[in-house]
Amino acid sequence: MDKILAIFIPFVFSFFSFPLAQWAGYRYELIDYPSVRKIHTSPTLKVGGMIILTGYILGVVILKTLWWQIGLCLILIFITGILGDKDILGPKKRLVLQSVLALLFIIFTDASVSDLRLFQLPSYLQIPFTVLGIVGITNAYNIIDGMNGLCSSLGIIALMTIGILGGLYDNNYILMHTLIFSSSVGAFLIFNLKGKTFMGDAGSYMIGFMVGSLSVVVANKVPHVSPYAFFLNSLIPIFDTIFAIYRRKRLSRDPFKADKRHLHHMLSRRYKSNKRSLIVLTLTQIILSSLAVLFHKSTPLLIIFILIATLFLRRLWFKRIKILGIVL
């Protein structure tokens, strides 16, 4: 019953918070205007972060599952995103703030990554490595947010996978929080797919931070789960981010400057359909996350899956792939 309420209550609050978020968006000019590098053609609100945060906070309070460490960090990462949406903070300053928040979360929860299975991290590298991981995942979901439904869908898949991995080892607290947050994102997704609002930096940062921080907690508290399961669980955002940085550096461009050559952009142009691009990427991540759950104990297999999937995504970026008679 608790799990049903964890899906229902946040969804309702998020869904019905849209008019208030809409008012705030117009009041404080949280509007995304069309540009050369963007897909949309008309000014659109970017208040998805407010919708998601409302459902999550009210959900954990009503269900009495408040986790103040993650709640506080989410509010602060939301504020960081709003400052980015308002062009008050540049990318580098946001990275600094994200790093501080990741460090605070690690200190608050006493959770960091130490065992990479192939080798043990030295004690002096454990916290910097974990901060880098959380910040990297946070920005990976922000970078992938270039098409309606993509960041939300991948975020829900990743969070539910983390919840399942926690639930397998009786960590129902993790499962409850992933359900509550995913439900809030799901309500936003309805408005997003209709083109009524974007999530903005505030929303994508929260999704990425939630995925990154909960991955760290499960990796730290559940020794049976290989850390590579979490890498595979977010492989599409991670691949797109690393490949974007590599591509821009190779062309001697600013790695922080956005372009229209991300994986979802390439697929949309190839298919002449944003919807088909969304379906292909979502189904691909579902398969990868399913493998992460099924083989979460096996580091060698997970590494093999990561390598094969990376080659697949790179190939998909460049040209069509035919699998079992289906052309991707």
Image (spheres, grey):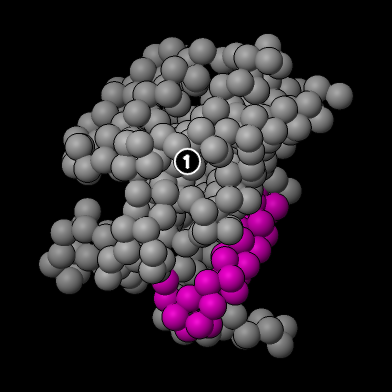
Q: Main secondary structure of the magenta part?
A: helix
> Is 303 within the magenta?
no
Residue 202 shown left or right of residue 94 in the figure: right
Q: Which residue is mark 1?
A: 22
Query: Foreground: 236 or 41?
Result: 41
Number of callouts in the render?
Answer: 1
Q: Quadrant of residue 269?
A: bottom left
Residue neighbourhood size for the residue with mark 1, other residues' Cα within 10 Å, grouped as few (<14), some (14–19), many (≥20): some
Residue 153 shown left or right of residue 76 in the figure: right
Query: Foreground: 205 or 297?
Result: 205
Instruction: Please say if 45 is above or below 205.
Output: below
Quarter of the image where the N terminus is located: top right
Quarter of the image where the C terminus is located: bottom right
Q: Is residue 33 visible?
A: yes
Tell me which segment is drawn in magenta. 265-292
Kindly give the residue lying farthest to the right in the view shown: 1
Residue 251 shown left or right of residue 74 in the figure: left
> Is 277 within the magenta?
yes
Q: Is residue 246 visible?
A: no
> Residue at left 59%, top 27%?
56
Q: Give how far across and how far down residue 305 sits, in percent.
A: 58, 59
> Residue at left 51%, top 33%?
20
> Residue at left 45%, top 37%?
23
> Residue at left 78%, top 26%?
5
Q: Amino acid at mark 1?
A: Gln
